[in-house]
Amino acid sequence: MLAAKDVSKLLADIPKGAWVALSQDEERVIAYAAELQEVLRKAKEAGEIEPIVTRVAETETGTLLF
């Protein structure tokens, strides 16, 4: 079983509602964009073949864990 990881600090400066691509080790933001296809394209251009993709909540709901 994988342990949950708090990535809220990584996402703190990302606009609400944006799609985010994280590195596989969940240590850095690879890219973010308003559209899913755009964030996937940016991640691929940055060399991240299989990023972890999530969307930043539109409202504050608490700590985001993976």
Image (tube, rainbow, N blue to C red):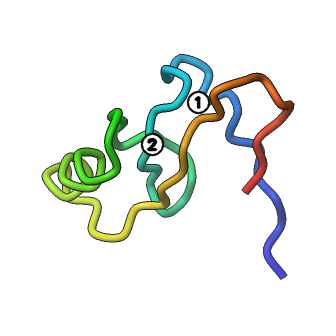
Quarter of the figure with the N terminus:
bottom right
Q: Is residue 56 left or right of residue 2?
A: left
Looking at the rendered structure, the kind of residue marked 2 is Val
Q: Position of residue 18 (x, y in %)?
A: 45, 33
**Mark 2 touching mark 1, by CB under 8 A?**
yes
C-alpha gap between disc 2 and disc 1? 8 Å
Q: Secondary structure at mark 1?
A: helix
Q: Is residue 56 above or below residue 4?
A: above
Which residue extends farthest left? 45
| Residue 39 numbered tag | none
Outermost residue on the bottom side: it is 1
Q: Residue at the spot x=30%, y=46% of the render?
A: 39
Q: Is residue 60 above or below residue 20?
A: above
Residue designated by label 2: 20
Q: Is 48 on the left or on the right of 8, as rendered?
A: left
Residue 11: mark: 1
